[in-house]
Amino acid sequence: RTESYLVGLVGDGVTPSLTPPMHEREGDVQGLRYLYRPIDLLELGLAGDSVGEVLRSARTLGFNGLNITHPCKQLVLQHLDEVSPDARRLGAVNTVVIRDGRFIGHNTDFSGFAAALASGLPGARLDRVVQLGAGGAGSAVAYALLSAGAKTLDLVDMDAERAAARAEELSGFFPDSTVTARTTADLPQLMPLADGLVHCTPVGMAAHPGVPLDLELLESRHWVADIVYRPIDTELVQGARAKGCDVLDGGRMAVGQAADAFRIFTGLDADPERMRSHFLEL
Ligand code: SKM
């Protein structure tokens, strides 16, 4: 019988992350003994490829699991005993549960975004979606959109090769959908055809202010999802609201990944709405 939970987040610069307080508060509310430690590789002077060693140390010390973030989401794969089919296809793991001495990997970035989309933009049309950004987070989001039934996905990235590689890979996983690599120059043609827009680049974060596209391209019939959550009201989110669009802010994905990881670690459902109100207080 597990009477307490000890989990952590491994990655570079994770000390200020909001994930630990989100989990701990949910544990408190559920009456659990639940501790969530940041394990900051930068502060520890450890490189990303020490994630295997960190995993084994965590097992030795009785951890129930770890969230894994940059730069370890791919590096961790080779150390796992089992990987969920979705995480395997995505080639990225952000949640490792330690059970009977075995490491089992999952990806709650994709499932968390899917849950966020379903709860925050219920009934959003997914026939045609434009996505900005095809990096790590973008890959998980694209996978979630296609899993949720997006029929046509236009994938825009400043790195044309990266967009092309992702589009080809995703087309292989979702043969009934059309995934096409695009450039920002295509946006004036694409937006009039799109139901919604998802933003997965760093633009709008405190360190990268601005908007990722010309807001004139937004129409009130578009829904807009941002995954940037610091600040929560990015310039894109504000601009889209001002246009009358239905909007999903980045906090929903941040909460979604945490809620799904909480369930994987404990076997207990987290309440995403309660987690979100706590997240908004942090
Ligand atoms: O996948 C998530 C991870 O679980 C937690 C996190 C964070 O708190 O910074 C970021 C994402 O990589």
Image (cartoon, helix red, strand yellow):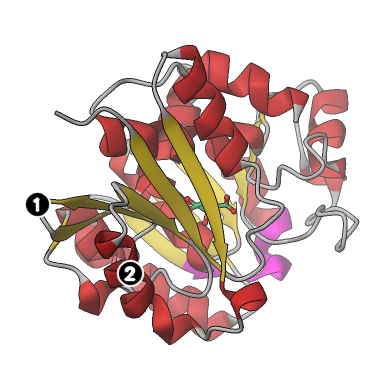
Q: Tell me residue 68's x, y (percent).
A: 43, 61
In the image, 221: left or right of 160?
Answer: right
Q: Which sits in the foreground, 156 or 259?
A: 259
Rendered residue at 33%/62% (across/down): 58
Please state the extent of the stretch shown in magenta in the rendering: 181-188
In the image, 168: left or right of 186?
Answer: left
| Vertical arrangement, residue 122 with respect to residue 242, above or below | above
Q: Which residue is mark 1?
A: 100
Q: Identify the image quadrant of the N terminus.
A: top left
| Vertical arrangement, residue 131 with respect to residue 122, above or below | below
Q: Which sits in the foreground, 193 or 2?
A: 2
Most common secondary structure along the magenta stretch: helix
Q: Which residue is mark 2?
A: 57
First along the sequence among labels 2 and 1: 2
Query: Is disc 2 placed on a helix, strand or loop?
Result: helix
Is mark 2 in CB contact (under 8 Å) with mark 1? no
Which quarter of the picture shows residue 170? bottom left
Rendered residue at 78%/57% (across/down): 212
> What's the residue type where badge 2 is placed?
Ser
186 drawn magenta:
yes
Q: Tell me residue 120's x, y (percent).
A: 55, 21
> What's the residue type where badge 1 is placed?
Asp
Q: Residues within 10 Å of mark 1 (few under 14, many from 20)?
A: few
